[in-house]
Image: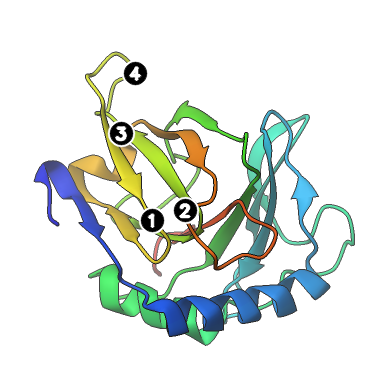
C-alpha cells in the first residue's frame, strides 16, 4: 500500500519462511551484540553494522542521549555485519542506490510502547528508513513533519514492511501498543522491529 508523502506500507513483505530465516539470523547477531536496555525506552535494543566495515558508527542511546557509535555499549566489540536477508530487503524496498549502514533492532515486550518521535540523527535524509516487523502485531501511529500534525494508526503484523521516505522521512511516528498473542513466530512473544538506515552521505 502506497501512501502520500513518501510513506509506503507493504503487508506480508516477508513470508513465514523468510521471517523464520531472519529470526535465526538475528539470534546469531545477538550472540555477538546482545540486546541492552535503551535509556528512556520501554524496550531492549541492539544493532548491526554495515557490510562495509569502514563505516564509522552505529546507533545507540544512553543517559547522554541518542547517537551513532562504533562499538557495542556493553561489550565494546564492533557491531556485527548486517545479515544478507536484510541487505536484500533494503535493495527491494529502499529505491536508493547505496547500501544501508546500520540496522537498529528494537525488542518490545507485551506492554512496551514508543512515543512519537522523528528519525533525524542521520546525515543523509535523502535515504529512507526501511522498517520490518516480526512477531506480535502493533498499533503504529504516524503523523506529519510537525509534532502537532494529525496522526493516523496502522496495524502492523509480522512480516510487514514500512518505508519512510520523501516527505515522510521526518514524519513523527511511534508505537501505541503491542497486541499480544497475534503471532506464533517468537516463542517468547512480543515484537521485534528492525529499521535499516543510511547514516552518512555518499562520497
Q: Nearer the viewer, mark 2 or mark 3?
A: 2
Q: Secondary structure at mark 4?
A: loop
Cα–Cα gap, marks 1 and 2: 8 Å
Q: Nearer the viewer, mark 4 or mark 1?
A: 1
Q: Which residue is depicted at the point 34% across and 18% down?
A: 147
- Relative to residue 118, is residue 55 drawn left or right? right
Quadrant location of the C terminus?
bottom left
- Relative to residue 136, is residue 156 drawn left or right? left
Q: Nearer the viewer, mark 4 or mark 3?
A: 3
Q: Label 4 belongs to which residue?
A: 147
Cα–Cα gap, marks 1 and 3: 16 Å
Q: Nearer the viewer, mark 2 or mark 4?
A: 2
Crowding at mark 1 (Cα within 10 Å: few <14, some 14-19, many 20+): many
Q: Earlier in the sequence, mark 4 or mark 3?
A: 3
Q: Which residue is depicted at the point 70% across and 59% down?
A: 188
Q: Nearer the viewer, mark 1 or mark 3?
A: 1
Q: Secondary structure at mark 3?
A: strand
Q: Label 3 belongs to which residue?
A: 142
Q: Label 1 belongs to which residue?
A: 157
Compared to residue 203, the image places residue 195 above or below, namely above
Amino acid at each position: 500500500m502506497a501512501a502520500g508523502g513518501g510513506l509506503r506500507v507493504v503487508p506480508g513483505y516477508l513470508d513465514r519462511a523468510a521471517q523464520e530465516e531472519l529470526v535465526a539470523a538475528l539470534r546469531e547477531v545477538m550472540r555477538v551484540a546482545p540486546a541492552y536496555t535503551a535509556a528512556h525506552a520501554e524496550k531492549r535494543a541492539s544493532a548491526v553494522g554495515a557490510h562495509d566495515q569502514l563505516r564509522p558508527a552505529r546507533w545507540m542511546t544512553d543517559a547522554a542521549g541518542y547517537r551513532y557509535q562504533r562499538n557495542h555499549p556493553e561489550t565494546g566489540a564492533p557491531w556485527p555485519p548486517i545479515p544478507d536477508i536484510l541487505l536484500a530487503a533494503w535493495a527491494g524496498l529502499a529505491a536508493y542506490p547505496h547500501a544501508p549502514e546500520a540496522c537498529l533492532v528494537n525488542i518490545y515486550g507485551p506492554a512496551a510502547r514508543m512515543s512519537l518521535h522523528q528519525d533525524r540523527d542521520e546525515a543523509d535524509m535523502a535515504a529512507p528508513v526501511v522498517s520490518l516487523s516480526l512477531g506480535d502485531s502493533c498499533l503504529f501511529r504516524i503523523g506529519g513533519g510537525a509534532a502537532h500534525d494529525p496522526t493516523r494508526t496502522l496495524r502492523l503484523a509480522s512480516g510487514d514492511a514500512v518505508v519512510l521516505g520523501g516527505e515522510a522521512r521526518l514524519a513523527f511516528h511511534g508505537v501505541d501498543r503491542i497486541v499480544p498473542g497475534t503471532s506464533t513466530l517468537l516463542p517468547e512473544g512480543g515484537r521485534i522491529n528492525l529499521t535499516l538506515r543510511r547514516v552518512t552521505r555518499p562520497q
